[in-house]
Image (cartoon, rainbow, N blue to C red):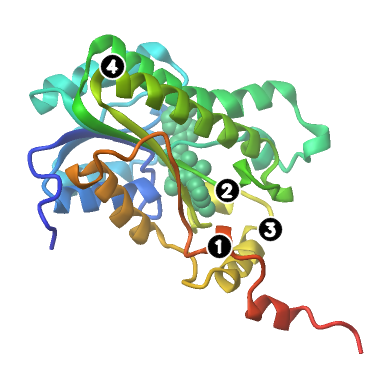
Amino acid sequence: MGYGLLKGKRGIISGAIDENSIAWKIAQRAKDEGAIFTLTNAPIAMRMGEINKLAEECNAEIIPADATSVEDIENLFSRSVEILGGKLDFVLHSIGMSPNVRKGKEYGDLNYEWYKQSVDISAMSFHKFMQVAEKQDAINEWGSIVALTYMAAQRTFSFYSDMADAKAMLESIARSYGYRYGKLKNVRVNTVSQSPTKTRAGGGIGGFGNFFEFAEKMAPLGNATADDCADYVVTLFSDLTRKVTMQNLYHDGGFSMTGISAEVLEMIKPAE
Ligand code: NAI
């Protein structure tokens, strides 16, 4: 049962590919809170067909868009406004992909064409979303834009490779565009830095399983799940957070502020 936090609000939710996707949970939660929205993903992701289930459940139309294509994004925003019957109040960017990570390339052996793709898909697309939205004047005053990120933007996690650089850029875009969009239209822009979460993108990272357990043992509240993330993001789309902007908001059970936990210390006993 929702609280009606998003009653009357319209939005776009990207990045739901299967029921483990963080965006999938956010869509379900946004629906519970009374929002109407369109769903989008890369045309290639449509082939899996899973997203149709979510669309049916949420009574939402799907608009395929490759996040690297300005043309696709223009169509996404203009069609969404048309279908939903008015300007948007929220946009979720839940898109990330690194061919280097997928193919196990180490940071000292990156393929630069793939590096460009990582940055284009995972970071520059966020700028493209906002530039298109601004040019089309597609977002209402006090609208809210959220992108999902990871703490490897601030601290090194050896397995995160070029995605760390993409996330650092994503968070910088949130600040730069947040300033601009705030001045222009009172639209707020934030990133949510989420715990490791068992999804397709998460599972594609080498050593993810071990790291998930480590983070679980470090965070005093344990890892935040995709459902927890959905709860948090819904508050950011709501009118209850109208003065929060240009922030990178940690949603990680306290992991980012923990030096070391008792559980992890216990695991690393010195040799007798
Ligand atoms: P996911 O694999 O379910 O979602 C990633 C989405 O990106 C997929 O739906 C995929 O189709 C979409 N995508 C990839 N290339 C695209 C393109 N060219 N155009 C449009 N869409 C494209 O995985 P998850 O974990 O839900 O990822 C969502 C976001 O959360 C990503 O930005 C990810 O980096 C971030 N995140 C994930 C964490 C995790 O441990 N799973 C932790 C922190 C952040």
Location of mark 2 (residue) = 151
Residue type marked 3: Gly
Beta carbon at label 2 within 8 Å of ligand 1: yes
Which numbered disc, 3 or 2, marks the residue that appears first in the sequence? 2
Note whether residue 67 is visible: no
Residue 8 spot, x, y in % from top left: 7, 38
Residue type, label 2: Met
Disc number placed over residue 189 in the picture, else none: none
Q: Quadrant of the N terminus?
A: bottom left
Q: List x then y, in percent, for residue 138.
A: 22, 18
Disc on the earlier residue, 4 or 1: 4
Say which amino acid is labelled 4.
Leu
| Mark 1 C-beta to ligand 1 under 8 Å | no
User: x and y percent of residue 197 in the render?
Assistant: 49, 57
Q: Which residue is mark 3?
A: 207
- What is the CA distance from the residue labelled 4 to the residue labelled 3? 43 Å
Mark 3 neighbour class, 10 Å CA radius: few under 14, some 14 to 19, many 20 or more: few
For the residues carrying marks 4 and 1, which lies nearer the camera in this image? Answer: 4
Question: Callout 2: 10 Å neighbours few (<14), some, many (20+)?
Answer: many
**Mark 3 or mark 1: whose residue is earlier in sequence:** 3
Marks 3 and 1 sit apart, C-alpha to C-alpha, by 18 Å
Q: Nearer the viewer, mark 2 or mark 4?
A: 4
State yes or no: discs 3 and 2 in contact (Cβ < 8 Å). Answer: no
Q: Which residue is mark 4?
A: 184
Q: Earlier in the sequence, mark 2 or mark 4?
A: 2
The amino acid sitting under disc 1 is Phe
- Looking at the rendered structure, the secondary structure element under dot 1 is helix
Q: Check contact, mark 1 vs mark 2: CB within 8 A.
A: yes
Give whichever of discs 1 and 2 has the lower sequence position: 2
Which residue is under mark 1? Answer: 255
